Structures are given as structure tokens and as C-alpha cells.
Image (cartoon, rainbow, N blue to C red):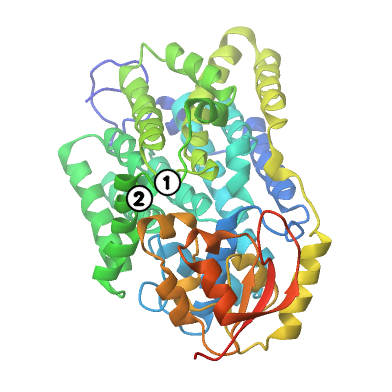
Amino acid sequence: MVNFQDGRRGSPTADGSFAPPAARVSCRLGPADAATVLSLCALATCWSWRLGTTFSHDYDEGVYLVSAREMLHGAVPFRDLFSSQPPAYLWMLRTALALGGDTVGSGRALSIVSAVIACAALGVLSRRLFGRPAALAAVVLCGCSPVFISVAHTCQPEALALALAISALSLVTGAGQVARGWREVGAGMLFGLALSTKLLMAPLALPLLWFTGGYKGAARVVGSAAAVVLAVAFPHDLRAVLDQAVGFHLDALRQGAGSHVGLREFFRGGGYLWFLALGGCLVRRRRPRLLVGLLLWIGPSAAFLLVHRPIFSHHLSLLAPPLALASSSAVAAVREKFGRVPALVLVALTVLLDIDRGASMRVSAPRPEEVAALEAIERYSSPEQRVVSDDQMLVFRAGRRVAGDLVDTSFVRMDTGSLTLHALERAVGSGTLVVVWTGRFYHLPGFADWLRERCEPLLEFPDAAVPGRGLHRARPPP
């Protein structure tokens, strides 16, 4: 075994922890801890500002929200609903809508709470590894990263999955009264929930197992994680879970379907944290166990994002926590050598240089045509009717429901053959309201002819890029 602190061989502490002395100091809150808590409160306040105002931050928001609404009416993922993600997030989102109301704000509030937990867990981890002042740097640098902000107040599973995975890392590196074996079981359970929320968390298994240390500890983590994954999946149709949550992504990868981030967008996602993180790794070169742990978090996460498909900009949030953790190491080293002020200046400068890229924090009111479309959907349909649309957020905000197989009408589904025109036809009965808004449906071969033959236009919102944009009513079949 190797001690985190200086790389020398030695024995673990009485509770089995190999955490540095910083993790075994008194639990009293000092000024740095108070500043960390205040920064978490400030971040949560900023993320919550005008929470439900922006119509849609991302296409996927509408997908998850209409899916959760269907679940409120008794639908089960993978059986009644198509879901390209593991089931845990949808069940949590359903709970959020049940408790907070069937609104966009309730779904986004779940992400804000998750993001606060993720930053807090990262702060605890940084405090244990690098000391108290580093915790503040980790929280601020992660919470102000544009790619992290993009998921912190958006109705998507990344924030929840990161909160669970980072909490697992924080738990397994800890020291305290709880026996190490139980901490390892708890860490495995948290990581199992993270995987059951978003498979994108898979690369974090490497640093988790590395910091666990020892075959017995790794076996506890893997066993408890596998048990949780099976327990979450078991109530569902397991074949459908594998087909939709795993096979669908493998098909997309094989066929090259969906978007893919280039190197420029990839490095832009991490921003100036890349440089600070590099410095943080260099200053820990005399602590090989810790350095390898940092590299095992950053490297596999980066490789996964570069190789996998489809990858969208919000997936880059996977980079923010490990880069912020490594950066906090650099900040702690600067503070130790030069004092508090240079360290604070370094954090502030990094945040200011990156924050200008945070377009996801800009709040915009719904456009007049979106308001008019919502009013039209309410006028031309009743609450008990299903609406077919290529923009699920429109349907959700109008208070309507969607047919289970059409909760996700993404390009990737169409490219992989998971969604076809035949499936669309099955969901459209006589009198069904069909809303053509983004033009996604035209990606289905034959849709233009089908729309002209089977539907009559009700209200048009002219757009040169989207023919027939507006509301249509399905005619009775011939």
C-alpha cells in the first residue's frame, strides 16, 4: 500500500484509510470551510435564477419531461416508453414532478440540488486530499465551469449521475468512525446508482477502484455496485433495457450516428481548467498514488468523450469535476508557497476567463411564436388527447401528453432505425394533433408525402427551413 501524502510505503490508519493527514484532522469548521459552504449557496442561487423562464435549454429536456409525465400516469420505462438511458433518472424526475408540481421548474430543481451535492462532494474530496483551502477552489472552479453550468440547471441526468459518482469517490477516500468495509460497500452502491442514472459515468470506475486499494475493497465496491444496477433494472423488462439503454448506443457507435465533438470543442469544454489541472498534476508528481488517481479520472473520461458517439456538448460536463479537482491541487500549492491572496487571484482569474463562454446561463423569455404555438396546442387539443410532435417541450409546456414511443424523436433514433415512419403512423390515430416544429420528422424517409396525404393543416408558422411548420390534424385512414 502507498500513502497518499508522500508516496512512502507504510501501514494504513486504524480505520483502514490511506487518506492524507488533512482527512484526519478535526471536523470543526474553519473559515475556509465556511467560505466553501457560502460558495455552494451562491452557486445554487445563481443556478436558480429565473429557473423556469428559458423555454428550453436543450432538446433532451422535453424528452425527459414528457417521459416523466407519462410515468405519473402509470407508464413504465422500456415497456410503455422508449428510453435511451438507464431508468434511475426518470424515476427521480417523476418523483420531483410529483412533489414539486408538473412543471419545468420542478425538473430543473432536481438538477440544481444534484449539482450542489456534486460540488459539495468534490469539495470534501479535495479537502481530504489537498487540505481545507483546496475545497473552496474545487467547488468554485467546478461550479463556474460553463460545461458544468450547462447541466446544473437543465433537466438532464448528468448532474444527478455526477453527484452520485463523486459522492462514491469521496466516501471511499474518507476516514472516520465508520469501518472502511462499510464505506466501500456504500461507495459501490452510490456508483451503482450513478451507472443506473447515466452510463456515461463508467470511466469513473477506474479512479474509484484505484482509491479503494486492495482486492477485497475492490470486490466490495464492484459487488455492491453490480447489486444496485441489477436491483434498479430488475423491475423492468431486462431485454428491453439492454436493447434501448445499451444496444441503441452501440448501434449509434457502429453506424457513426449522431454528433461528435472535435478536438477544438473538446478542449474548449475544459477551458482554462486544462492548464491549471496540468499544473496541479505536476505539483503532485512526488505523490505517485494520488497523481495516478487524478490521471485515471481525467484520462479515461477524456478518451471516452473523444471516441464515443453520440456526444453532445452537455456530455462534456464529465470533464469539469476531475479538472477542477486537479486544479484545486495547484491552488493549494500556490497558497502554501505564496500565500492566500495569489491563490484567490488564480481562482478568480480562471473563473473570469471561462465565464464569458457560459451561454447556457443566459436567460431568455419564450419567443412570441412559441407562446402562440402553446396557445394553439391548447386550443386544438384536449388534455386527455395525445399530441405528436418533434419538439417535446412544446407539448409538455402546453400540458399535453405524448405517445410512449414518440417521447424521443431524436435524429439518432432515426439514423439507427429505432424510430421509423411506420412507428409514427401507428401512434397517429384519426383526429390526432401533429405538431411539426423543428423539422426533425423530415429526417424520416417519406414523411413529407405522409404529412400531405394523411393530415390537414390547421395553423401555420411559416419558416423557410421547415416546410409545413405548424399544427396539423390527422385525417381518418382511407
Residue type indicated by callout 2: Ala
Asked if 406 appears above or below 354 in the picture, the reply is: below
- Residue 443 position within the rendered picture, expressed as x and y whole percent measured from the top left: 50, 58
**Is 161 or 16 nearer to us in this picture?**
161
- Which residue is more in the foreground, 25 or 136? 136
The crowd level at tag 2 (other Cα within 10 Å; few <14, some 14-19, many 20+) is: some
**Residue found 67% across the figure and 78% down from its top:** 399
Circle 1/circle 2 CB separation < 8 Å: yes
- Residue at numbered disc 1: 310
Q: Quarter-wise, where is residue 129 in the image?
A: top left
Left or right of 93? Residue 358 is: right
Q: Separation of disc 1 and disc 2 at Cα?
A: 7 Å
Q: Which mark is residue 133?
A: none
Q: 15 or 394: nearer the eye? A: 394
Residue lying at the far top in this picture: please name it: 338
Residue 478 on image: x %, y %: 49, 91
Instruction: Give the quadrant of the N terminus.
Output: top left
Q: Residue furthest right?
A: 368
Residue type, mark 1 in image: Pro
Horizontal relation, residue 248 to residue 53: left or right: left
Report x, y in % for residue 253. 33, 46
When the figure is inspected, residue 7 is found, relative to residue 21, above or below; the finding is above
Instruction: Name the residue: 72% across, 25% down.
Output: 352
31 vs 234, left or right, is right
How crowded is the residue under tag 1: few (<14 C-alpha within 10 Å), some, or many (20+)?
A: some
Q: Which residue is mark 2?
A: 252
**Residue at image location 60% in from the left, 72% down from the top:** 97
Foreground residue among 75 and 142: 75
